[in-house]
Image: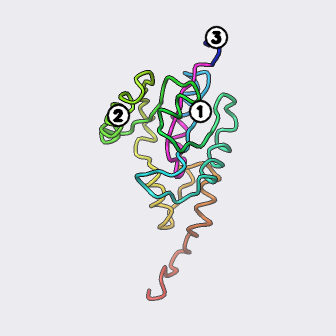
């Protein structure tokens, strides 16, 4: 631990919604750093969230409640400014595939240009989560699929409220 601040990392993202893959990366980061600040971007610029920022934060706080060194905060500024606000010198990002790396590599260099003191640490996803994405989970849920093993229980319940699962043999539309 440093003299004035614990060794801190940030784990920024939209978390729309949080998946078990996200939770795995955050848990692993909490084993490396003294404090993990999960940053939920208020208004993602590259996609329109399904869930409100309040829901996304509540999902994360409930799922991470057993981790006392992890806190969840909202941010609406550059990610490097968010890191500076929490005295974090490291940003932790999960990687599933080469396509993730290409995007994150580009973002890393842009962030280093803005804040050379903030490093990016990449953690490879655990094999059981290498296929998992928030957009994939939303697609499965929207078509009535079971996402119970992919997301925390509160998120799965919320999906069932938004997208009730059709009964087998029940027409999805009146024309069927």
Indicate which disc, 2 or 3, sits on the residue closer to the N terminus. 3
Q: Is residue 160 left or right of residue 94?
A: right
Q: Which residue is mark 3?
A: 3
Residue visible at 44% across and 30% down? Answer: 123
Q: Secondary structure at mark 1?
A: strand
User: Label 2: which residue?
Assistant: 110
Q: Is residue 35 left or right of residue 16?
A: right
Tell me which residue sits at (63%, 49%) in the image: 59
Residue tagged by mark 1? 37
Indicate whether residue 135 is drawn in magenta: no
**Which label lies toward us, 3 or 1?**
3
Q: Is residue 145 left or right of residue 36?
A: left
Q: CA distance from mark 2 to mark 3?
A: 30 Å
Measured as percent of width and height from the top left, residue 44 is found at: 47, 50
Residue 20 shown in magenta: yes
For label 3, the SS is: loop
Name the residue: 48% across, 55% down. Answer: 137
**Image position of 159 with respect to 121: above or below:** below
Q: Position of residue 175 (x, y in %)?
A: 44, 88
Residue at x 50%, y 47% (from the top left corner): 14
């Amino acid at each position: 631990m440093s003299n004035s601040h614990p060794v801190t990392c940030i784990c920024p993202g939209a978390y729309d919604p949080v998946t078990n893959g996200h939770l795995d990366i955050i848990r692993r980061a909490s084993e490396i750093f003294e404090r993990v600040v999960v940053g939920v971007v208020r208004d993602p610029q590259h996609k329109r969230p399904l869930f409100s920022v309040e829901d996304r934060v509540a999902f994360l706080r409930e799922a991470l409640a057993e981790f006392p060194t992890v806190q969840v905060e909202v941010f609406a500024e550059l990610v490097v400014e968010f890191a500076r606000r929490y005295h974090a010198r490291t940003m932790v990002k999960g990687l599933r595939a080469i396509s993730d790396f290409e995007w994150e590599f580009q973002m890393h260099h842009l962030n280093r240009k803005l804040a050379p003191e903030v490093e990016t640490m990449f953690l490879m996803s655990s094999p059981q989560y290498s296929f998992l994405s928030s957009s994939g989970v939303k697609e499965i849920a929207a078509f009535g699929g079971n996402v119970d093993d992919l997301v925390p229980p509160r998120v799965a319940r919320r999906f069932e409220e938004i997208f009730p699962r059709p009964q087998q043999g029940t027409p999805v539309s009146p024309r069927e």
